[in-house]
Image (cartoon, coloured by chain):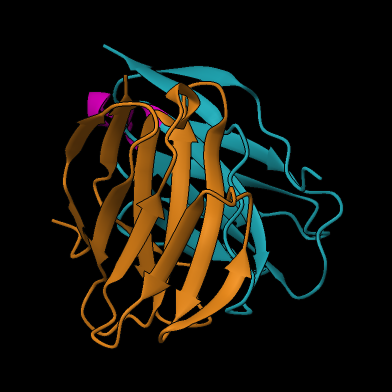
Amino acid sequence: DAKTTQPPSMDCAEGRAANLPCNHSTISGNEYVYWYRQIHSQGPQYIIHGLKNNETNEMASLIITEDRKSSTLILPHATLRDTAVYYCIVRTSSGNTPLVFGKGTRLSVIA
Amino acid sequence: DSGVTQTPKHLITATGQRVTLRCSPRSGDLSVYWYQQSLDQGLQFLIQYYNGEERAKGNILERFSAQQFPDLHSELNLSSLELGDSALYFCASSVQGLGSYTFGSGTRLTVV
């Protein structure tokens, strides 16, 4: 069962903020939202995760709505190197629950 | 370099053959995960090991098997290979209980 819904593709102009939405309306109270990206056939790369508070790191910001049913990953100043497939994943913190990847959003950053 | 080492990077073999893919996790990580990525299937979880023990199983075929050794490296064995097994195989590692996996650069398997 798909726990998240993401648009299949998005475009973003270089230098602009890229806002990638994710719907997870059936998220449980103990489930985190994780974001990964995969740049053309490379291994997926962890970006950020959060439970209910907004989070920021050197790569991106994660905004989670108050009802936790959706979230947005923000890349503040997209570059061509940010062109990738971005995956939004909902997962508990339990070590026995592996990451399950959906189809993600293919972000194209355009010069 | 992510810290997760996968060998070989590329592998070409014939149908019916058997191959072994190797993964060395990042230092300090006890969990190892294997994923398969083919063009039409996306990233599929195969199997997870934690400190030598199998912890979770995904869509892993009976022709495939894996193990994690005392030094924590892991091997994925693929036998009776078919054309459809051609794919990228990724290994990832993590500290137990966290979802921030570190992935290796993958092994590209081509079955001819």
Q: Is residue B55 left or right of residue A39?
A: right
The picture's colour for chain A is cyan
Q: Residue at x 46, y 49 (%)?
A: B35
Residue A56 seen in the current view: yes
Q: Residue at x 59, y 46 (%)?
A: A88
Q: Position of residue A54 (x, y in %)?
A: 58, 63
Residue lying furthest left in this view?
B1
Q: Considering only vertical position in the picture, is A96 above or below B9?
A: below
Q: Position of residue B93 (x, y in %)?
A: 36, 68
Question: What residue span does the magenta drawing correspond to?
Answer: A77-84
Q: Residue at x 62, y 76 (%)?
A: A96
Which chain did the image draw in orange?
B
Instruction: Count the marks.
Output: 0
Q: Considering only vertical position in the picture, is A15 above or below B48?
A: above
Taking depth in this image into account, of B33 and A74 the one nearest to the observer is: B33
Tell me where residue A46 sits by quadrant: bottom left
Q: Is residue A86 left or right of residue B23?
A: right
Q: Residue at x 17, y 41 (%)?
A: B9
User: Is residue A87 within the magenta segment?
Assistant: no
Please state, as top left, top right, bottom left or bottom right, where the C terminus of chain B lies in the image: top left
Q: Position of residue B106 (x, y in %)?
A: 27, 45
Residue A17 seen in the current view: no
Q: Position of residue B6 (x, y in %)?
A: 21, 55
